[in-house]
Amino acid sequence: MQNQKTEPAIVLPVMEIFYSIQGEGFHQGRAATFIRLGGCDVGCVWCDVKESWDADAHKKFSTEEIISSIKISPSEIVIVTGGEPLMHNLDLLTAELKSEGKKTHLETSGAHPFSGKWDWVCFSPKKFKEPLDEIYSKADELKIVVFNNSDFDFALEHASKVSSDCKLFLQPEWSKADKMIPLIIDFVKQNPQWEISLQIHKYLGVE
């Protein structure tokens, strides 16, 4: 049986493919095609796509089928998200995306072995499953979801491990936004190397 973590995945469990606006982090506000893969073992209690967790609940698509479905998208950006996409070896998928002239963006917790060729890596570590050390040097963007006060120390801990060029973002967890945004503002004013990410797609009412 093929080991998807060490061999490029020929088929992948796909929850959805959709064209929308990147609502978070450094590229927020830009049009992008999203490939949301099934499968996640990180277990964030506040996850808003828990239906993605069970990989077996989602139809498997060949790389060729996935590429065919994104060809009509006018945006050059393709964001591979989840779930936790690095549960699958993404070497083949990203190679094919690049052959179509697409810019490949990854959203990951870093809890599984790194694979794929990426133009942008958004690393969002979670307390529920520790990231692997190899992810820190790969990250273009560190995005910390702020659910409670201890997440500020968590943010500083991980920021000390990424490269000096890595962009740093704090993002309030949606259900706690009213409470956490004032604290995030104060933190960023005291630590101006950080920026605020606000999930603007939810404010705009888009997927």
Image (cartoon, grey):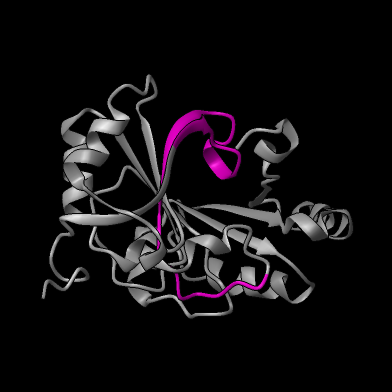
Give the residue at x 31% y 31%: 70
- Residue 91, percent from left and from top: 18, 54
Q: Point out the stretch of residues depicted in magenta.
A: 18-45
- In magenta segment, residue 19: yes
Q: Is residue 129 above or below residue 168?
A: below
Horizontally, residue 151 falls left or right of residue 142, namely right
Q: Give the number of marks.
A: 0
Q: In front here: 164 or 157? A: 157
Q: On the image, which quarter does residue 22 sit in?
A: top right
Q: In front here: 142 or 148? A: 148
Give the residue at x 79% y 52%: 189
Q: Is residue 7 above or below residue 103?
A: below
- Residue 86, percent from left and from top: 34, 64
- Residue 24, percent from left and from top: 60, 43
**Quadrant position of the C terminus in the picture:** top right
Q: On the image, which quarter does residue 116 sit in?
A: bottom left
